[in-house]
């Protein structure tokens, strides 16, 4: 099982303010560190039209990381493909692939936030169709593509095209096994070889004297509370903050499924994921509230305990 | 006067990146990349780790797509470059009628504050009835730029009044212009360059107070030819002669001497 790390978003939030230009300036050195630690890949995520400077075009940032690394794969988890102009984005991918041949991993999702679609003059209810159109443009480029999500439509879309899949971080082992089986069945039904299956997992290695250890749980919870509270539609209308009980229940699940503990414990959990049929895990160490030296130290602890030196679980 | 080298386009990405780094070594102030073949913003991201001082001029068409994609890409590239980015816009063929609105939208979106635009082609936010949840009346495009605002230049004399209204620079194909604008850049081809270098009157016209702020020199359109040593020499020579209103006696002869005897010469070319 390949092991990658993420998610670089280059945010500067109210809870974790940082100079934006300094974040971009530090990116190349961070990519080099991730490569030296022996991880398979470094992953970025996209959002737009929010106060926090979230990087809305991660492919541009990935080009910088690509030029200072030799073997590190660079991926998106996720690129909100339905929000892009398909022709323009195909050229972006083609150029980035030319900058880093064979090292681009394109994770794509539909996007969920109405305000992002509306800001670009797009209809959210057309996002499935726009995704199909964009994939039609991208598939001939031959860049490894990963479909994000676990809805039937997403899994069927990936299975019919022979793409990979990235499952969300909230799944428990039984659910992961069920999804792997479902994807295998859908691929067989579509007459395609099943693509690789990945998963995102929130992660932190404790016990390495990091000053953040004791506060990590609350920090990550606050990160998700802000994002889910502001953006997620948990039931009907309104946002998560307007449905506090549902919001807390959702956060509990996110947090319960996270891998937080000593390196050997996290490594053990990674072994379980591999046994479930997962081919790639994207470990989310890098949040707005954890970004920096502590996150890199946490990654290094895990790399030393669990990686084989070639980007895979030992 | 700033010297900008517009890199040859019909070549591979590695050649473009190498040419840009070479241009910085040779003393150019800026490198121009267009969107004719590759994504210039991706190239800018890649170059951010290889260039330490050169400013990038990204020459992009607008009108065919929502300009906010370009705005976002430029903002990310500009942050990676530590602020050394200028955006040059030209109308996409067949979309000239949308150019004014596109430039206004780009200009507005670079201001790092929530805005709305009630334009004909890209109302922002669109306020579509199909989008229902947690909509916002204004959008802010991030990330914030390093510069107070990313400079915008428009290409072509027909856009001079728009450039003046929005405080944009202007790129013209000739120095024969007295258009008011924030920054005047003139494009010059290889043949014209040779004439200018040899013609003291032409040189004075470039160098006087109303001359261009920047000179954009197009590399050979022949993809097999990079910028020749002679071309670079001509440009550097041109600038040296224009940076002072009047050269002291003997300096021009001194330079000519080093040109004729490479052993006495500098590292030019």
Image: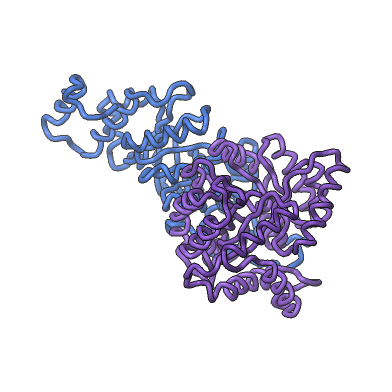
Rendered view: B231 above or below B244 = above
Residue at the outermost top position: B260
Rendered view: B18 above or below A164 = above
**Percent position of residue B71, x then y:** 55, 51
Residue B111 in view: no
Rendered view: B155 above or below B114 = above
Choose between A72 and B23: the one closer to the eye. Answer: A72
Q: Tell me how the rendering is colored.
A: by chain
Q: Is residue B240 left or right of residue B213?
A: left
Residue at the outermost left position: B249
Q: Quadrant of residue A247?
A: bottom right
- Give me the residue at 49% from left, 67% from top: A208
Q: Colour of chain B?
A: blue
- Give me the residue at 72% from left, 64% from top: A170
Quarter of the image with the N terminus of chain B in it: top left
Residue A75 in view: yes
**Percent position of residue A251, x then y:** 69, 73
Choose between A18 and A300: the one closer to the eye. Answer: A300
- Give me the residue at 72% from left, 79% from top: A244
Q: Colour of chain A?
A: purple
**Percent position of residue B105, x then y:** 58, 54
Q: Is residue B181 left or right of residue A261?
A: left
Quarter of the image with the C terminus of chain B in it: top left
Rendered view: A237 above or below A114 = below
**Percent position of residue A157, x then y:** 80, 47
Choose between A60 and B180: the one closer to the eye. Answer: A60
């Amino acid at each position: 099982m390949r092991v990658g790390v993420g998610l670089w978003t280059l945010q500067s939030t109210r809870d974790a303010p940082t100079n934006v230009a300094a974040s971009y300036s530090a990116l190349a050195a961070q990519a080099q560190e991730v490569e030296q630690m022996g991880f398979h890949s470094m992953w970025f995520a996209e959002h737009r039209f929010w106060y926090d400077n979230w990087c809305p075009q991660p492919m541009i940032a990935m080009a910088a990381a690509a030029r200072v690394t030799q073997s590190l794969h660079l991926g998106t988890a996720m690129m909100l493909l339905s929000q892009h102009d398909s022709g323009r984005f195909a050229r972006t991918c083609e150029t980035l692939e030319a900058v880093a041949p064979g090292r681009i991993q394109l994770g794509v999702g539909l996007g969920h936030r109405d305000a992002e679609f509306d800001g670009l003059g797009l209809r959210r209810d057309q996002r499935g169709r726009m995704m199909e159109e964009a994939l039609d443009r991208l598939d001939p480029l031959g860049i490894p593509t990963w479909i994000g999500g676990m809805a039937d439509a997403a899994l069927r879309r990936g299975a019919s095209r022979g793409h990979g899949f990235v499952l969300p971080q909230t799944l428990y082992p039984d659910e992961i096994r069920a999804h792997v089986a479902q994807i295998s069945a859908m691929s067989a039904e579509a007459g395609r070889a099943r693509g690789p299956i990945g998963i995102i997992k929130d992660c932190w290695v404790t016990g390495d004297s990091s000053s953040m250890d004791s506060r990590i749980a609350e920090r990550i919870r606050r990160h998700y509370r802000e994002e889910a509270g502001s953006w997620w539609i948990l039931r009907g209308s309104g946002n998560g903050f307007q449905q506090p009980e549902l919001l807390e229940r959702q956060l509990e699940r996110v947090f319960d499924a996270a891998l937080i503990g000593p390196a050997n414990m996290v490594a053990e959990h990674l072994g379980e994921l591999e046994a479930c049929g997962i081919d790639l895990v994207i470990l989310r160490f890098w949040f707005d509230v954890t970004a920096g030296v502590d996150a890199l130290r946490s990654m290094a602890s895990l790399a030393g305990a669990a990686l084989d030196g070639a980007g895979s679980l030992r | 006067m700033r010297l900008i080298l517009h890199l040859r386009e019909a070549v591979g990405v590695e050649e473009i990146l190498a040419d840009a780094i070479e241009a910085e070594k040779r003393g150019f102030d800026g490198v121009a990349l267009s969107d004719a073949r590759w994504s210039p913003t991706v190239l800018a991201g890649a170059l951010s780790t290889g260039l330490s001082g050169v400013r990038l001029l990204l020459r992009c068409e607008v009108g065919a797509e929502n300009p906010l994609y370009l705005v976002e890409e430029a903002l990310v590239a500009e942050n990676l470059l530590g602020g050394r980015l200028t955006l040059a816009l030209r109308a996409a063929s067949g979309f000239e009628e949308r150019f004014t609105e596109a430039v206004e939208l780009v200009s507005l979106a670079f201001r790092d504050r929530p805005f709305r635009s009630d334009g004909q082609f890209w109302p922002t936010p669109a306020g579509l009835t199909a989008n229902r949840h947690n909509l916002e009346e204004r959008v802010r495009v991030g990330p914030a730029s390093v510069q107070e605002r990313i400079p915008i230049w428009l290409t072509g004399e027909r856009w001079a009044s728009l450039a003046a209204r929005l405080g944009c620079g202007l790129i013209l194909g000739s120095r024969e212009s007295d258009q008011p604008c924030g920054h005047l850049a003139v494009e010059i081809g290889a043949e014209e360059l040779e004439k200018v270098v040899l013609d003291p009157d032409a040189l004075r016209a470039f160098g006087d107070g109303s001359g261009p702020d920047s000179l954009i020199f197009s590399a050979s359109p022949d993809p097999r030819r990079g910028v020749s040593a002679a071309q670079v020499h001509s440009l550097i020579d041109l600038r040296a002669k224009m940076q002072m209103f009047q050269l002291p006696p003997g300096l021009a002869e001194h330079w000519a001497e080093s040109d004729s005897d490479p052993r006495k010469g500098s590292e030019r070319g």
